[in-house]
Amino acid sequence: TTYSTCTQDFEEEKGVVKFRMSMSLSKDFVQMMGFPPPPPLSASQHKRHAQKTTKYVELIIVADNREFQKQGKDVERVKQRLAEIANYVDKFYRVLNIRVALVGLEVWSDSDKCPVTQDPFNTLHEFLDWRKVKLLPTKSHDNAQLISGVYFQGTTIGMAPIMSMCTVEQSGGIVMDHSENPLGAAVTLAHELGHNFGMNHDTPERGCGCRMTVDRGGCIMTPSTGYPFPTVFSTCSKKDLAASLEKGVGMCLYNMPEVKVLYGGQKCGNGYVEEGEECDCGELEECMNPCCNATTCTLKGDAVCAHGQCCEECRLKPAGTPCRESSNSCDLPEFCTGANPHCPANVYLHDGHSCHKVDGYCYNGICQTHEQQCITLWGPGAKPAPGICFERVNSAGDPYGNCGKDSKGLFAKCEARDAKCGKIQCQGGANRPVIGTNAVSIETNIPLQEGGRILCRGTHVYLGDDMPDPGLVLAGTTCGEGMMCLNRQCQNVSVFGVHQCSGKCSGRGVCNNKKSCHCEEHWAPPFCERAGFGGSLDSGPMRLSGTVHSPFSSQREESQKAEIEIK
């Protein structure tokens, strides 16, 4: 797993306190704060204009027991602070057309529900495991963040997995409440959420544009930020986000949150249509909606609707109108229902389904390949190294070649069958990694039996840097015919049951992540066995028109081929 940490070092320079990545907290600042001493994908023909569509992160914030104690053991005081943190984060992300909706707060007032220690790595793992096993089954949400009163060891004040938004296993992070002002923790949370979205740091070599100078705070994803706290995103962050969304990161963010679960109560002007409201376009000074009265949150005149991709000029679009195109080879399109102004929630191909026109398999709505990751690490021209590189390097069980860590925290050797699920090995590309960190190239020359040698290129980041191991192969990456990397093992995609699911679609559709059939045009869900409008019960009906492109015929052939191979 690739993680990102937010670390800080504080020094005063011309009245500005800087937080510098991968260094240590100064003694003066520790005393002052009262701490205890211790590549983007190429666009497909179905490219979604994701940046133009509002995304909603349904966020849960958890405060650990130490945070509860720091706030005077006052539960309401803790909740008020967490709500204020969430409000700041929502404001930061609005300019990116992302709303951060606080759908839950939890305060561990009695004791921590998972181990929280000064070791940020262990704390993150424990928190994400708790979220998966305990929190997700009881409370629907997209992302969870732990606000901790614990002073993490070293320089870390936050940590989060990279490009993990919406995943069951890793959509979350940990944040140290390091400042008396809640804005400090809010900036760190926004930073970690940015990493969940796939944003890297704004390092000098990336040439990022930031409209705020350093003395005015700089940008949220810069590796050197401080007082005043940053509140804006750079051009690099916006590009990283666009690339991630196009790739399929954040598939769960296209549905409106259930307004009844929003924390903080109902309010006209918060941008969410709640009970008793016909519309809500935000505060009066920010409302630009011609269909909505910002003062009363009611529709103007004879308007039927005011919001949503299926509302145009205050009227509902006809059923079957495309409202969200597929964004990548694992995504599926959505269509207006004719009865709702909002586009149906996003759906995508079932895990283990063959990617459309790409040699790989879908996982969490993304088609992961070694080639794609090599390009991300090394830039254009990079490609995966031959299999012998993976086998030789990853059999070492050291920081430079491994299949992750075992239960004792030691680097694990890769079995030959799992070698392509360890540290990724590439060839070509730039002279050094282009991921915007202090990653270094680890090159290995392997002699061949037939003579000559082969060069394998891996990456390594020294402990304490922003990305401890950006070179591990991502979960869901193809590792062989009908095989995929899961938990550092090369496993058969049949574990997902995709061929059983697709088998009920009568050969005229594909299985989506809801385990429903997404039918071709002219065939009706739920099982594509009768004539109808196409689409699915989840995504709305396709329009009966020759102008609407159907991507399913070639996918059906690929799916049937994959099923034969798996069986």
Image: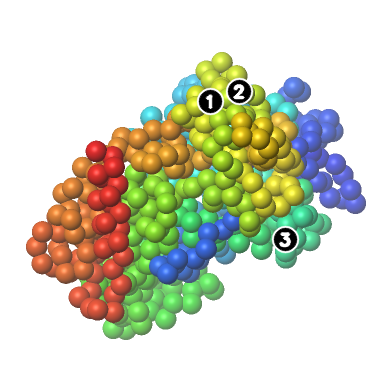
Q: Is residue 104 visible?
A: no
Where is residue 326 shown, x and y percent of the image?
A: 38, 63
Q: Which residue is mark 1?
A: 414
What quarter of the picture does the C terminus occupy? top left
Which residue extends farthest top?
A: 408
Identify which amino acid the numbered label 3 is placed on.
Cys
- Circles 2, 1 touching at the beta carbon (< 8 Å): yes
Labels 1 & 3 near each other (Cβ < 8 A): no
Q: Could you say which quadrant of the image residue 343 lies in?
A: bottom left
As drawn, which residue projects farthest toward the right? 14
Q: Residue 397 — which label?
A: 2
Q: Amino acid at mark 1?
A: Cys
Please state the horizontal and vertical placement of residue 128, each as a whole percent of the image: 48, 32
* Distance of label 2 from label 1 (alpha carbons): 7 Å
Instruction: Name the one closer to the observer, 225 or 149.
Output: 225
Residue bearing the label numbered 3: 208
